[in-house]
Image (cartoon, helix red, strand yellow):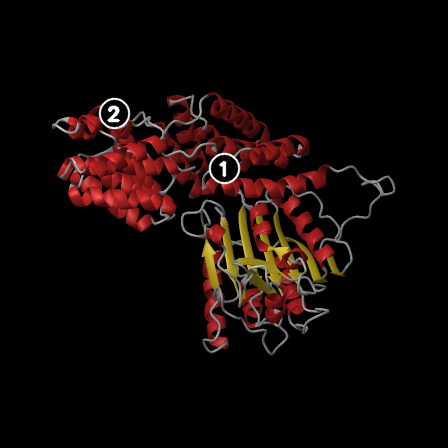
Amino acid sequence: MRRLLLVLPAMLAALLWCAPAYAQARNQLGPLCTTETTPADQMVDACTKIIALKVFKGGQLATVYFWRAVGWNKKGEYAKVIADATEAIRLQPSQAVYNLRGSAYYDKGDYDIAIADFDDALTLGPPSGIIFHNRGNAWRGKRDYAKAIADYDAAIKADPKSAFSFQNRGISKEAVGDLDGALADINQAIRLDPSLPQPLINRTAIWRARGDFDRAIADGSEAIRLAKDKPPVNIMTPPNSVLISGYTHRALAYEAKGDYAHAREDYKATLAIVASDAGSKANQATAKVRLSLVTDAAAPIPRDAPSPATQPAASPAPQQTGAASAPSPAPAVRGTRMALIIGNGGYAHVKTLPNPPNDARAVAKSLRDIGFTVSEGVDLDRAAMQKMTRDFLREAARAQVALVYYAGHGVQVDGRNYLIPVDVELKPGTGMTDAMIDMDTIMAGLDDQVRTNILIFDACRNNPMAQQVASAGTNRGIEGASGLAAPTSLGAGATLGAGTLIAFATAPGQVALDGEGANSPFSAALSRHIGTPGLEVQQMLTRVRAEVVSSTKNKQVPWSNSSLLGEVYLAEK
């Protein structure tokens, strides 16, 4: 969870009012502008009126711009924070202003610029534990956990009672696999300030990673109680974000335990709260998908359905085609590595693709050979594809690694990516996207930093559906484009996707080749390298990329984006 702190020395307010000024500015507008607890809109309005009076210059005017930036920061309008802080720095640089602007750049996901501002703040001095803490957050955003831990060390040395520095150092240790160190730090954060819900939420995730669901639920419950009783007052913490996170994490713990009724109630509670920041909205997107999945899981079995005891055992490698229903996988055991493999080529209304079924079978075999439990589907219509995907998302809740591979047609519409079932038929005026599978839904359903998620899409092929997409979107403001779009959920600064790697057969917006052999260039390389023992997954994709670039004579360059929290090996060393 994000936690940035501000340096707000009282001298900034005192400096503003130490010289004669208009009585209105001093007596009426001043306290509203320079009091940290002033509501955001009132603070911005008061500071704006002071600036309009043109009373102050130099350092005093810099102070007004600083406080207006604080007001913008409360509202989450980071571009305006940066503009006002930049003006304050031009008038008179100060440690507090550099820290504030760095914090805004951090919230925008511009981590390198944020680090530069925190560096300047520390150069101006004196050494500040708060600024070390904030720079540690930026290093953590860049996934440079060693530097993050070093800055949290410095923050803790400056302020041994900083609960949030212990908490965030614990999060960084968890990211590098040091669960014992992470637990020790988060326990210390809880001892230092038992009233904070955030460390309890982080400990919920650790207990869940260890499979101790009862402790996870207990910590989640206490975090929710604290968030309700004492909402965060720090201006850097968006309203409702802590409560939303608490409900989401407790719901995931209930779901992992198999208590779908309580999970369903927590997901509903998450969706009922108004979200005001990207992280909370990401949690709500996950809650929406998971609520649907646990509702399915908790649904009563029809009377004419066979009982679980009389059903035939599931095939170790379930495979289906066409409209056939996918058998639900057996409940996953903690530590299971699961894969969903789909290859669609036999399209009914557009030119068929000969290779995707072969690609899917080749990748599925490679994964089974290294111990994955694989659900495999070939030439699926929408109903079968939707069911197989939902079954996988539901059962993957208890998996340690979840991998999704799709080969076939894909399309981006208004910047969102969709996978195409074999029975799709696009006609003008139809509910076009309703006939496809939304990639964002898959990503939201898997979003959980406790699990490693790997999503691989060989769906960027030359799309004969582009003209139909354009015509179906007439008068609806819909735009189709070549290739797939870079997922916004893995963009800079976003929280959705922690622990996730996504790979495309070629760069976003570009077209991949189907190939002249039995497999596409991408899947042929992938199936060869994915089972290499001791090869870290990102190094594996680098080998795949090099092979594809070579075999296509630079016409196709595979793309990937990672928010993995550590090294991942698909095949044991």
Residue at image location 59% in from the left, 43% down from the top:
335
Name the kind of residue labelled 1 in the image: Ala
| The furthest residue to the right | 304
Residue picked out by circle 2: 28
Mark 1 or 2, which is nearer the eye? 2
Number of other residues with Cα within 10 Å of mark 2, as a class: few under 14, some 14 to 19, many 20 or more: few
Name the kind of residue labelled 2 in the image: Gln
Work out how far the residue at label 1 is from the one at label 2, CA to CA, in angstroms: 33 Å
Q: Position of residue 328 (x, y in %)?
A: 73, 48
Number of other residues with Cα within 10 Å of mark 1, as a class: few under 14, some 14 to 19, many 20 or more: some
Is residue 310 depicted above or below 432 in this figure? above
Residue picked out by circle 1: 275
Side of 2 where 376 appears, left or right: right
Q: Is residue 490 visible?
A: yes
Q: Is residue 165 visible?
A: no
Side of 160 where 344 appears, left or right: right
